Image: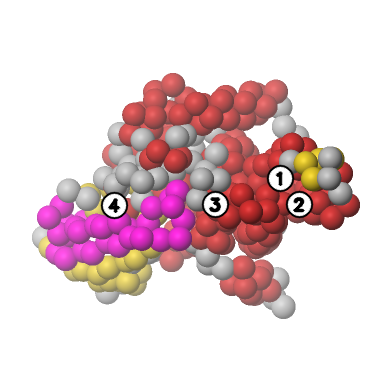
Amino acid sequence: MVSTRPDLTLSGEHDELRSTVRQFLAATANVRQVMETADGFDRSSWKQMAEQLGLQALLVPERYEGLGQGPVEAQIVFEEMGRALYSGPYFASVALATNALLCSGDEAACGDLLPGIAAGTTIATLALADGTANRDGDGWVLEGSHRFLPNGHIADLFLVTARTDAGLSLFAVESADPGVKARALESLDLTRKLAAVTLAGAKARLVGEDGGATEIVQSTLDRARVALAAEEAGGAARCLEMSVEYAKQREQFGRPIGSFQAIAHRCVEMLQRVEFARAASRYAASCLAAGTSEFPVAGRVAAAYCGSAYRWVATENIQVHGGIGFTWEHDAHLHYRRSWASETLLENTDQHYLAIADRLGL
């Protein structure tokens, strides 16, 4: 990282990207319909997303058949994904798997694996498994298990960490291998399915250097946290929109409830937290794009603030809606569930603050 100033300006192309993604998700997300299915997402809209928008290829460099866009563009897309409660494996494939391959610096693995991810034909995810890897001729065999793996039950490709004699290493494992067993888990978030994956003699390909996964994982998670923070900021923004819309429509004593000071004050504080969350995630993405020395701390700040802000705003959204906000039919509880689950997906708020203190030498 070098010390340069991040560029926080957004262009007309960025506005167009946001508008296009929002329109697409509004037309295809179908959260209520797909969250009850075994897959938890709509494969036809996933294919449509790849063919029409190329979003799965967003962060993939052009030499690997991608669009070659950067963290700022990704921040916009992930914010819209969070706003729509998108249930497909976009976070798993793009924020986790794509970044892991790019951070590995393994040109051969990137050349072989990234084109499929970019085309949307390969669904990939990252498994920080507690297992071992042993040599088997020219290849490797993995043993171990991992829980709470985003979209692991539908993944075609797993990027798995395991220990070798040289240390923690990263491997690519195909889900079709008979040594791989994956099953969906019941979890708090109904819109992003998690899975348990067991590896028993699964054949694997080493990605990067043997024993070199620690830095790969750290860099990958730093980038993924920015994507998750953007999702949380988008979700919080949608909760605010829902509250304001309802406060304008719902009447008590012959007047909209938004005219009452108690409701107005709630919405103002929600707005404040939403704007701070969007600013934090955008700043972190801009620091990553510029390669500044601030990025590791900025990314953790965004993760810590956006996670707690989304949870708080999602809770207030239910309060503004009153009785209807507690019902199954209303989407308020879906955001509430997503906020709690997201806040702990890549470490929790306390862990983020401890990491910030450590990186600042406090």
Alpha carbons under labels 3 and 4: distance apart: 29 Å
Percent position (x, y) of residue 357?
68, 74
Task: Identify the residue position indicated by label 3 in the image.
Answer: 327
The earlier-in-sequence mark between 3 and 2 is: 2
Alpha carbons under labels 1 and 2: distance apart: 9 Å
Alpha carbons under labels 3 and 2: distance apart: 21 Å
Percent position (x, y) of residue 331?
55, 45
- Crowd class of label 2 (few under 14; some 14 to 19; many from 20; radius 10 Å): many
| Callout 1 secondary element | helix
Percent position (x, y) of residue 341?
51, 60
The earlier-in-sequence mark between 3 and 4 is: 4
| Callout 4 secondary element | helix
Q: Is residue 155 magenta?
A: no
* Residue found 45% across the figure and 48% down from its top: 191
- In the image, which disc is placed on residue 128? none
The earlier-in-sequence mark between 3 and 1 is: 1
Q: Are marks 1 and 2 in contact (CB under 8 Å)?
A: yes
Task: Identify the residue position indicated by label 1 in the image.
Answer: 243
The earlier-in-sequence mark between 4 and 1 is: 4
> From the image, which quarter does the N terminus lie in?
bottom right
Magenta residues, start to end: 177-205
Query: Which numbered mark, 4 or 1, is in the foreground of this view?
Result: 1
* Residue found 54% across the figure and 52% down from its top: 327
**Residue type highlighted by circle 3:** Thr
Task: Identify the residue position indicated by label 4 in the image.
Answer: 153
* Residue found 33% across the figure and 34% down from its top: 43
- Crowd class of label 3 (few under 14; some 14 to 19; many from 20; radius 10 Å): few
Task: Identify the residue position indicated by label 2 in the image.
Answer: 270
**Residue type highlighted by circle 2:** Met
The earlier-in-sequence mark between 2 and 4 is: 4
| Callout 3 secondary element | loop
Q: Nearer the viewer, residue 258 or 82?
A: 258
